[in-house]
Amino acid sequence: MAAQRYRGEHSPDPASNEPHIEAPKPMSMPRRKAVKRPGGIAVSLLFLAPFPLLLSGFAKISNAAPIEAATAFGTYALFVLAGWTLREGLKAEAAYNERKIARAPMFPRKIIAAGLSGAAVLLAAWLGWGQNMFTSIGFGALAVGAHLVAFGLDPMRRKGLVGFNEYETDRVARAVEKAEAIIDEIESTAARINIRSVERKVEGLLNSVREMLRVVEQDPRDLTRARKYMSVYLSSARDATVKFAELNERSRDTVKQKEYLSLIDDLETSFNGERTLMLQDNQSDLDVEIEVLQERLQREGHLASE
């Protein structure tokens, strides 16, 4: 169904004969702020702590000790890989917690990061500090335990809504994950454009998209009608943003910028209008369910007839 342009109180041309749809009010959800680096200082320390191993590796090279140098570099690489894997695991966990319907991450990145940290400590203790094998294994096990205590385990179960089967919730989770990935691409591309007016327009569109995703998560039955918006229209916004970014790197074309901003405005209006219609349909479904329940209670004598 084609989306209809809504007209609010201050919209131009109030005498237009187009169907009137009130501008949707924002949903009671916080708008996404600038994303902080997951894990904060603790994850940063995982990258900084093994830095002496890197210096040690270069020192071993200068002392003509290639095996010791390779050991130092390898241990350093394990620590860095553990930090990167942990950061990705924290990102996946944050996305999981943010959604009402979500699948558990495919790979338990936080657990893998704990194993990598343990292996790095084991190697450092055994080959770098000259400890025996059993002592080194003990240090590695302690490192794994400390890592898990500090950062926890990965989400292990899928998260869904009561009243909907696993197939429906899994279908919605896949669609939302795909849409969120496109949103991230649009955000990163818009940041690369580095024009504040463009970033504000894109931010408004993406907030509208996220609000639609939350509506779909609350009622998976809306996925069918929202699929075109979550895939086709959102992908078109991504492609247009990428093309405009490439063009903007070559030349600042104000005409193309106006055309791009106009497209983003139209898309935001379409997303808001469709979301409003989805919410209206949900309210109609609720009214019907209430009427049916009232009739049943009256028949069974639990509710007085009006």
Image (spheres, helix red, strand yellow):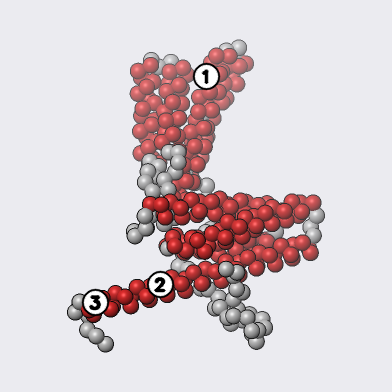
The percent position of residue 109, horizontal first and vertical second, equals 45, 38
Describe the element under mark 3 as helix, strand or loop.
helix
- Residue, x 74% and y 51% (percent of image)? 246
Task: Choose top left, top right, bottom left or bottom right for residue 15.
Answer: bottom right
- Residue, x 38% and y 41% (percent of image)? 153
Q: How many marks?
A: 3
The percent position of residue 278, horizontal first and vertical second, equals 49, 69
For the residue carrying disc 3, how many other residues have a C-alpha within 10 Å: few (<14), some (14-19), or many (20+)? some
The percent position of residue 226, horizontal first and vertical second, equals 53, 62
Q: Is residue 49 in sight in this rendering?
A: no
Task: Tell me: residue 180, above or below residue 2.
Answer: above
Name the kind of residue labelled 3 in the image.
Answer: Leu
Label 2, label 1: how far apart the Cα atoms are: 65 Å
Describe the element under mark 2 as helix, strand or loop.
helix
Left or right placement of residue 151 versus residue 203 in this view: left
Tell me which numbered mark, 3 or 2, is placed earlier along the sequence.
2
Name the kind of residue labelled 2 in the image.
Answer: Asp
Towards the viewer: 295 or 48: 295
Can you identify the residue that label 2 sits on?
285
Task: Tell which tag, 2 or 1, sits nearer the viewer.
Answer: 2
Tell me which numbered mark, 1 or 3, is placed earlier along the sequence.
1
Residue 297, numbered label: 3
Name the kind of residue labelled 1 in the image.
Answer: Thr
The C terminus lies in which quarter of the figure?
Answer: bottom left
Task: Choose top left, top right, bottom left or bottom right for residue 111.
Answer: top left
